[in-house]
Image (tube, grey):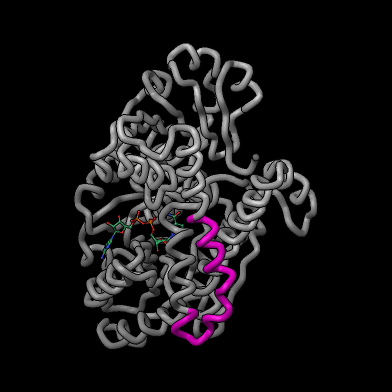
């Protein structure tokens, strides 16, 4: 089957490569010509496990190509997935849909024969009818262009696996048993045949699905972080509390790790976008719990600042702080709304000299935060530091021997904001340890 993927960032490049892996002939389209060149050379313009392999395999096999031309994309196939960014608008929590409507506007003139436009980007509920109306008016094929909604649940760091073996598929249509449904069932044929739960629903439910899923995940993280605040005051241990709660299958341990909270390109903006849209719809009362989840998340970042004050005093001028972690989570180079960089930036603003290290995200961090210092080696980075902050839980950091590290600093103090350091070992090695979720 021939199909296109319009917008080839973290989601779209992965989707395009995985669709080729499933046997389709895929044309990826992105307005960023540099990205197109990198993708055509069989490489990912960002770090995502296994993606380079798939891109190399299928650009070589000829099943996968990339272009910056809308005309070429419109001509190439009758099924077009849209995966452009829907970031947060400047100054509000609402989604910025300008990339989506730019893509639809530029694709429309080329749609001269029946086509299906399947949107994967995360949007506020109510966007699908606007896209459909626009295409009906502006595509030469008019009514013969059908719109489908196909929200994406992949997680960066396991995006390829999540795309090839998703835990569910959601397909939203405005008409039952449409041609759009037939085409999408064909595109996802192997995944559906593998027994993946496939929910066919209306546009609105499909649009809401992603925002609701991320709102739940954010709330789950903030729930255990709210418990962590109580643990810090009461002498309890939030990680062990999470273990205890997690054994209840109605609760579950996954996605419930106390720590510095959530960040990234999706959870924070989807939470904000969901709340904003619910307000617009007159359902604002329903989102009180989500506002609180957001507030708890912000407090975790402040807690690390407070612990820093407790260790170094409130005047941070002249203090040297090493931060382990820049990516918003391990196994990605994505620094969008990274909790680690937010804390690093705040400490810099308070006068500290902050040196950041990260296995994959340093290039991105350097571009966004040129005011911070950077180091490649996490061990050398602690030299002369007054304090070490563990803010992104890369396995590489967890494996470092605290005994060896203690010999590199005259101020062996660490704050573990992610709960993955073996603090007993660190204390035995002479470190003063502080952590989130423990007194
Ligand atoms: P991204 O910023 O990495 O990628 C967006 C891509 O779209 C970029 O390559 C950009 O150049 C391209 N683009 C922008 N405007 C364009 C246009 N008019 N025409 C063609 N290309 C254009 O973003 P992302 O993380 O891949 O997210 C994309 C969408 O998928 C968002 O709505 C996001 O919420 C959603 N999503 C992302 C993930 C994830 O883990 N990253 C998971 C599920 C859903």
Q: In this view, does 192 lie above or below 240?
A: below
x and y, in percent, of residue 375 in the image: 33, 26
Q: Please say whether residue 42 is visible from this viewpoint.
A: no
Picture residue at 47% right of the left edge, 76% below the top: 180
Camera-side residue: 389 or 57? 389
296 within the magenta span: yes
User: In this view of the protein, can residue 39 be seen by the observer?
Assistant: yes
**The N terminus - image quarter:** bottom left
Ligand 1 falls in quadrant: bottom left
Q: In this view, does 299 lie above or below 215?
A: above
Query: Which residues fall within the magenta stretch?
Result: 278-298
Which corner quadrant of the image does residue 418 belong to? top right
Q: Where is residue 242 in the image (x, y as percent from the top left)?
A: 71, 47
**On the picture, is 44 further left or further right than 339?**
left
Q: Residue at x 67, y 59 (%)?
A: 195
> Where 258 falls versus 400 (above or below)?
below
């Amino acid at each position: 089957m021939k199909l296109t993927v319009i917008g080839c960032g973290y989601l779209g490049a992965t989707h395009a490569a995985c669709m080729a892996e499933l046997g389709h002939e895929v044309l990826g389209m992105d307005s960023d010509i540099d990205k197109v060149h990198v993708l055509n050379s069989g490489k990912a313009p960002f770090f995502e496990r296994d993606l380079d392999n798939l891109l190399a395999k299928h650009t070589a096999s000829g099943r996968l190509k990339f272009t910056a031309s809308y005309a070429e994309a419109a001509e190439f196939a009758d099924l077009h997935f849209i995966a452009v960014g829907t970031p947060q608008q400047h100054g509000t929590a609402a989604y910025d849909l300008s990339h989506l409507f730019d893509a639809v506007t530029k694709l429309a003139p080329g749609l001269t024969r029946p086509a299906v436009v399947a949107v994967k980007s995360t949007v506020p509920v109510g966007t699908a009818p606007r896209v459909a109306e626009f295409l009906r008016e502006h595509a030469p094929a008019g009514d013969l262009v059908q719109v489908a909604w196909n929200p994406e649940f992949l997680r960066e760091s396991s995006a390829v696996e999540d795309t090839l073996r998703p835990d569910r598929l959601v397909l939203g249509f405005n008409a039952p048993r449409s041609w759009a449904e037939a085409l999408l069932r064909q595109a996802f044929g192997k995944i559906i045949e593998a027994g993946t739960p496939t929910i066919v629903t209306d546009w609105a439910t499909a649009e809401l699905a992603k925002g609701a899923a991320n709102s739940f995940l954010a709330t789950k993280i903030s729930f255990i972080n709210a418990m962590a605040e109580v643990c810090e005051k009461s002498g309890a241990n939030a990680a062990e509390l999470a273990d205890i709660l997690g054994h209840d299958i109605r609760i579950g341990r996954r996605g419930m790790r106390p720590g510095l909270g959530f960040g990234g390109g999706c959870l924070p903006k989807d939470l904000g976008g969901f709340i904003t849209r619910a307000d617009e719809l007159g359902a604002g009362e329903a989102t009180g719990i989500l506002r609180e989840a957001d507030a708890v998340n912000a407090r975790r970042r402040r807690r690390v600042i407070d612990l820093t004050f407790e260790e170094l005093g409130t005047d941070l001028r002249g203090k040297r702080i090493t931060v382990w972690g820049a990516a918003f989570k391990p196994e990605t180079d994505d620094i969008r709304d990274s909790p680690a960089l937010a804390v690093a930036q705040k400490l810099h603003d308070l006068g500290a000299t902050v040196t950041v290290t990260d296995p994959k995200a340093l290039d991105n961090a350097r571009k966004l935060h040129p005011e911070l210092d950077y180091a490649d080696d996490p061990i050398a980075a602690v030299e002369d530091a007054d304090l070490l902050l563990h803010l992104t839980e890369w396995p590489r950091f967890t494996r470092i021997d605290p005994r060896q590290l203690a010999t590199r600093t005259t101020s062996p103090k660490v704050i573990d904001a992610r709960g993955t350091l073996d603090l007993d070992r660190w204390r035995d090695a002479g470190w003063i340890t502080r952590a989130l979720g423990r007194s």
